[in-house]
Image: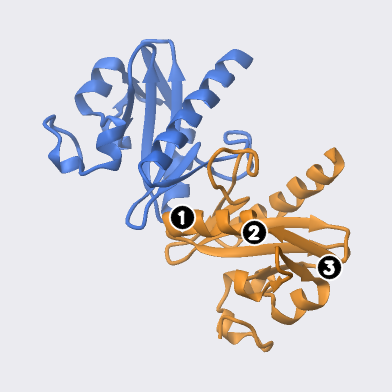
Chain colours: A orange, B blue
Amino acid sequence: MINRKAKGTKGERELVQFFNENNWACIRAAGSGSSRYPSPDLLAANAIRRLAIECKVTKDQKKYFSKDEIEQLKFFSQHFGAESWIGVKFAGEEWYFMMIEDLESTGSLWAVDVNLAKRRGLKKEELVGNVNTTNSSNSTS
Amino acid sequence: MINRKAKGTKGERELVQFFNENNWACIRAAGSGSSRYPSPDLLAANAIRRLAIECKVTKDQKKYFSKDEIEQLKFFSQHFGAESWIGVKFAGEEWYFMMIEDLESTGSLWAVDVNLAKRRGLKKEELVGNVNTTNSSNSTS
């Protein structure tokens, strides 16, 4: 459990570094998930766009999100004035960023596996760049 | 030192609660001050305004800020697209929020004491409300 949390923190710090290197401002939230109030794991912005990102680092093949996690992300983003994004890093893969609508609904949960992430997700360079120039079909077009 | 840090965290959590109760979204930054990249203590926003806030809880009569702290706050705010604010809570007093220009320059540091905070600062209700309706003269007019 501690090890899993440490991997999540390390992954988030790598993203903070990436955003900063691309001239975005980015902060990691303290105690995300344990806070009384909705809070994404990362908040990144430049002068034009603001991204609230729920991040998951996993060694599993499929990652699940509870309805509550998704609702809290949407609630925060609506109040903050940010876009809602899900960031997932599967073992041996790059980070992929998905919009909530692109997750698979399993009824009581939302899910994403490696194939879905690769098919519909954006790589981090696409997330911060002009996403309309990507070759893959994705929900932002 | 640990006690001082705990008081700072407690103070920040109270502000997170206040912002949420007033329908703003707000997150506390993880490891602010120890991060490699500029990060304010709090980031609060609604659909219209975004505030990057450096927070200090102190039992001293006067609080100092290094040039570096102020520069990092300004850097973050410029990249994120947020207003820079300094929040100070002196013992037995409410929180007061100041703009950087309202701090006293001591040459190598910036400073604020209780009198300056009361004269030029905004109370938290003024910070989230219509600051132009305050009776006190302040820098936002």
Estimate how packed mark 3 is, as few (under 14), some (14 to 19) or many (20 or more) residues with alpha carbons within 10 Å: few
Examine the rendering and report whether any part of residue B70 can be seen. no
Which numbered disc covers residue A18?
Answer: none
Disc 2 marks which amino acid? Lys
Which numbered disc covers residue B80?
Answer: 1
| Nearest-to-viewer mark from 1 and 3 | 3
Q: Is residue B60 above or below residue B81?
A: above
Disc 1 marks which amino acid? Phe
> Which residue is identified by label 2?
A67
Examine the rendering and report whether any part of residue B83 can be seen. yes
- Mark 2–mark 3 Cα distance, whole angstroms, equals 25 Å
Instruction: Give the chain letter at badge 1.
Output: B
**Residue B24 in the figure: left or right of residue A105:** left
Q: Are marks 2 and 3 on the same chain?
A: yes
| Nearest-to-viewer mark from 2 and 1 | 2
Which residue sits at x=60%, y=81%? A139
Image x and y of residue B71, in percent:
44, 40
**Residue B73 in the figure: left or right of residue A8:** left
Which numbered disc covers residue A93?
Answer: 3
Instruction: Give the chain letter at badge 3.
Output: A
Which residue sits at x=61%, y=74%? A101
Estimate how packed mark 2 is, as few (under 14), some (14 to 19) or many (20 or more) residues with alpha carbons within 10 Å: some
Image x and y of residue A85, in percent:
60, 64
Which residue sits at x=87%, y=66%? A61
**Residue B85 in the figure: left or right of residue B118:** right
Q: Are marks 1 and 3 on the same chain?
A: no
- Mark 1–mark 3 Cα distance, whole angstroms, equals 29 Å
Disc 3 marks which amino acid? Glu
Res B123 quadrant in image: top left
Disc 1, SS: helix
- Mark 2–mark 1 Cα distance, whole angstroms, equals 29 Å
Number of dots carrying numbers: 3
